[in-house]
Amino acid sequence: MSTYKIFMLITIPALAIGWGAYWWWMRKIEEEEKNQPKQVSKRLTQTKSEVSNWAQKMAEFKPPERKKFEDDE
């Protein structure tokens, strides 16, 4: 048997086992992340409140009335 065949007989199953283990580990991590509550940073909550305040001010905004120019003729 050639060295290449021996190498391939060892590496292909090892590679398949490695990818299977990687897939299983990533699936396990995703399930753990789903069960944990999402943490919201202080900066994100501050930004959300600032945007909310800005939107409320924009909703209350009334543009100034335009001066109407009348012809003297």
Image (cartoon, rainbow, N blue to C red):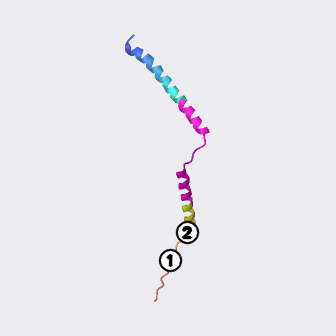
Q: Residue at x 58, y 38 (%)?
A: 33
Local secondary structure at mark 2: loop
Disc 2 crowd rating (10 Å Cα; few below 14, some 14-19, many 20+) is: few
Q: Residue at x 56, y 65 (%)?
A: 57
Does residue 13 sit above or below 26 in this rendering?
above
**Amino acid at pointer 2:** Phe
Q: Residue at x 40, y 15 (%)?
A: 5
Closest to the camera, between mark 2 and mark 1, is 2
- Residue ranking furthest to the top: 1
The image quadrant of residue 11 is top left
Q: CA distance from mark 2 to mark 1?
A: 15 Å
- Residue 66 circle label: 1
Q: Residue at x 56, y 57 (%)?
A: 49
- Residue 35 circle label: none
User: Contact, CB < 8 Å: mark 2 with mark 1?
Assistant: no
In magenta stretch: residue 30: yes
Residue 40 coordinates in the image, percent (x, y): 56, 48
Viewer-side residue, 11 vs 34: 34
User: What is the magenta range?
Assistant: 25-52
Q: Quadrant of the N terminus?
A: top left
- Residue ranking furthest to the bottom: 73
Residue 64 coordinates in the image, percent (x, y): 52, 74
Q: Is residue 56 left or right of residue 71?
A: right
Does residue 33 sit above or below 51 in this rendering?
above
Q: Main secondary structure of the magenta part?
A: helix
**Residue with the mark numbered 2:** 61
In magenta stretch: residue 63: no
**Amino acid at pointer 1:** Arg
Viewer-side residue, 72 vs 17: 17
Residue 2 coordinates in the image, percent (x, y): 38, 12
